[in-house]
Image: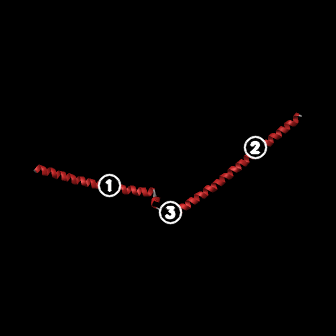
Amino acid sequence: EKMWQAAEGKESTGNNARKETDEERVQRLAAEAAEAEKMWNLAVPERHWGITSPMIPLLIFGIVAMQYFISTDGQVQEDIEQNEEERLKAERLARRKARLAAEAKGGEGEE
């Protein structure tokens, strides 16, 4: 009987130690979950924003500013391309006139 009680005592002590380990594990997991939640909130802050959030007007302003810069940059690039095209046309016209003038001189000498 004494052996039986001793075995039960050890078993109950083992269960207490096991419960403490489980409680520690739960606390550790809860702390890890809280840390993960903090990191997620830093990475995805808009998750908690509503229509009345102070960030909404800032985002709208940012979108409008970006669209303005994109549209004006496109016009500047278009102007640069148009000027380049006009320059190339002028160069081709000058070469054509020079070639025609050279052919005209060469044709006059043959007659």
Q: Is residue 11 left or right of residue 94?
A: left
At a point 66% along the width and 54% down the height, the residue shown is 76
Q: Residue lying farthest front?
A: 51
Q: Residue lying farthest right?
A: 111
Q: Is residue 54 left or right of residue 20?
A: right
**Image label count:** 3
Which numbered dot is residue 28? 1
Amino acid at pointer 2: Arg
At a point 61% along the width and 57% down the height, the residue shown is 69
At a point 21% along the width and 53% down the height, the residue shown is 15
Per the model, the C-alpha gap separating discs 2 and 1 is 78 Å
Which numbered dot is residue 13? none
* Residue under label 3: 55
Name the quadrant containing residue 111. Answer: top right
Amino acid at pointer 1: Arg
Q: Earlier in the sequence, mark 2 or mark 1?
A: 1
* Residue under label 2: 92
**x, y percentage for residue 22?**
27, 53
| Front tag of 2 and 3 | 3
**x, y percentage for residue 93?**
77, 44
Amino acid at pointer 3: Met
Q: Is residue 91 above or below residue 73?
A: above
SS at mark 3?
helix
Q: Residues within 10 Å of mark 2 (few under 14, many from 20)?
A: few
Q: Residue lying farthest left?
A: 1
SS at mark 2?
helix
Q: Residues within 10 Å of mark 3 (few under 14, many from 20)?
A: few
Per the model, the C-alpha gap separating discs 1 and 3 is 34 Å
